[in-house]
Amino acid sequence: MSIPTLAGRLRDAVTARTAIEPLSATVPELDLPTAYRVQHVLRDEAGPLAGWKLGLTSRAKQRQVDVSEPVHGFLPAAGALDLGEPLDTAALIAPRCEPEIVFVLGHDLAGPHVTAADVLAATAGVAVGIEVLDSRYRDYRFTMADVVADNTSAGRYVVGPPVPPAGIDLRLAGVVLEKNGRVAATAAGAASMGHPAAAVAWLVRALAATGEELRAGEIVLSGGLTAAVPVEPGDVVVVTVDHLGTLELACR
């Protein structure tokens, strides 16, 4: 089955707002390089990009699914929600929310040897983020290649006001995810590869392998810090990250 055909199946699922069986169900030989090619087709069709996102940055999650590296996807500018804007759940298939630490790049970053220190030096600001996942696969059942092809389940995202990273130890920043006034999960920044900046550095190195880079002004969602919570109309999700602030997302 051709790359454009596989991308078309995912595109149709988004348009119809209907979950499909994983691509690997009919293409069992689907591997990660092929999946990234499918994702690239979708990226070319997505219009202006706001930046990038990481997935599977937690070591525990990597062990759970038997992988040794994160995965990455892209953030269409059209997927951004403004502060105070509600999430239209009817526009998605099965939305779930997770907390993020977001990097706003002040300088370009490129190359196969970029470190977490390089990332922090190039960062203009860090912010609280809420990523809204929306897998196109039924019941969120997929292989690693499936989720990469599906742009790592990207749906919507909202980013709070950025603050300068100087003086903030993002490893130790406490994270609280609340849903409808109750604590759903807690974590620290270190849940993302030991340091969120290390996750962004991995992304830069991964992009360098295909001749790409991060650009000044782009944002990077550095990886979900807790398990994602399902949401439906009437729900309110609040994420608080020490030193970065609090972000609220209402669902309708």
Image (cartoon, helix red, strand yellow):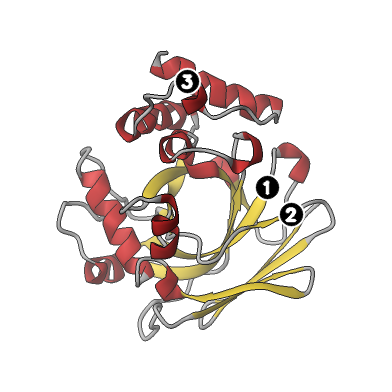
Q: Are marks 1 and 2 in contact (CB under 8 Å)?
A: yes
- Which residue is disc 1 drawn over? 95
- Residue 191 visible from this viewpoint: yes
- Which residue is disc 2 drawn over? 231
Q: Amino acid at mark 2?
A: Val
Q: Quadrant of residue 237?
A: bottom right
Q: Is residue 129 left or right of residue 39?
A: right
Residue 118 picture location, percent across and down: 22, 67
Q: Give the SS element for disc 1.
A: loop
Residue 53 picture location, percent across and down: 44, 51
The residue that appears at 41% across and 66% down in the rendered structure is 192
- Which residue is disc 3 drawn over? 6
Kindly report the distance in space between the C-alpha atoms of the residues bearing marks 1 and 3.
22 Å
Q: Are marks 1 and 3 in contact (CB under 8 Å)?
A: no
Q: Quadrant of the N terminus?
A: top left
Q: Residues within 10 Å of mark 1 (few under 14, many from 20)?
A: many
The residue that appears at 72% across and 61% down in the rendered structure is 84
